Image (cartoon, rainbow, N blue to C red):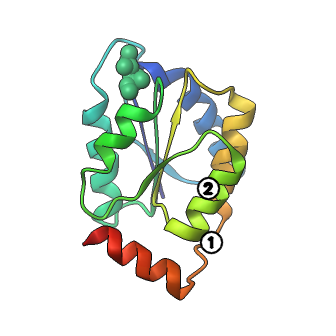
Amino acid sequence: MIALGCDHGGYDLMQEVMAHLDQRGIEYKNFGTFTKESCDYPEYAKLVANAVVDGTCEKGILICGTGIGISIAANKVPGIRCALCHDCFSAKATREHNNANVLAMGGRVIGAGHALDIVDLFLDTPFSNDERHIRRIKGIEG
Ligand code: RB5
């Protein structure tokens, strides 16, 4: 189960992400926002982050206008490793190296075609389980 959240700046791209997940048969829980009306991204970041941390969802995808605000907010929740990715290399690397559990993107930054490739890499790439990466992730957690 994938947790989804966005603000008004990410709303349009999130519709594309949901259609893509439907097409791939991947289950998701959409935490909103549900309209294009202006809203506050921290609310949706926290809903998604909490669903990932409490195990309701295995990963999350967050979208705001830039991806920046919503990723900063998600990373305030202990246990969240939210990666802001606008390229395929980073999406793959953050799974392999950081075991990122939430992907953030900016709906005003990239087109849907590119974003969906990033989503696929994020969802399909396993963590490397390399000792050095495990050590570094533990280091993040303090
Ligand atoms: C909303 O206008 C915009 O500030 C928000 O979507 C995001 O880009 C914040 O980081």
- How many numbered marks appear? 2
Could you say which disc has been placed on residue 126 in the image? 1
Q: Amino acid at mark 2?
A: Phe
Q: Amino acid at mark 1?
A: Pro
Looking at the picture, tell me which residue is in the foreground, 124 or 75: 75
Helix, strand or loop at mark 1: loop
Ligand 1 within 8 angstroms of badge 1 C-beta:
no
What residue is rendered at 57% in x and 44% in y? 85
Mark 2 nearby-residue class (10 Å; few <14, some 14–19, many ≥20)? many
Ligand 1 within 8 angstroms of badge 2 C-beta:
no
Residue 11 shows in this picture: yes
Which residue lies under the disc numbered 2? 122
Farthest bottom residue in view = 131
Please state the quadrant of the image where ligand 1 appears.
Answer: top left
Mark 1 nearby-residue class (10 Å; few <14, some 14–19, many ≥20)? some
Residue 34 shows in this picture: no
Query: Seen in the image, is 101 located left or right of residue 76?
Result: right
What residue is rendered at 52% in x and 88% in y? 131
Looking at the picture, tell me which residue is in the foreground, 121 or 84: 84
Helix, strand or loop at mark 2: helix
What residue is rendered at 29% in x and 70% in y? 141
* Percent position of residue 111, x then y: 69, 26
Instruction: Please report contact status of discs 1 and 2: CB closer than 8 Å, yes or no.
Output: no
* Percent position of residue 115, x then y: 66, 37
Q: Quadrant of the C terminus?
A: bottom left
* Percent position of residue 112, x then y: 69, 29
Q: Is 56 placed above or below 13 here? A: below
Between the residue at mark 1 and the residue at mark 2, the CA separation in whole angstroms equals 9 Å
What residue is rendered at 42% in x and 82% in y? 135
* Percent position of residue 98, x then y: 50, 66
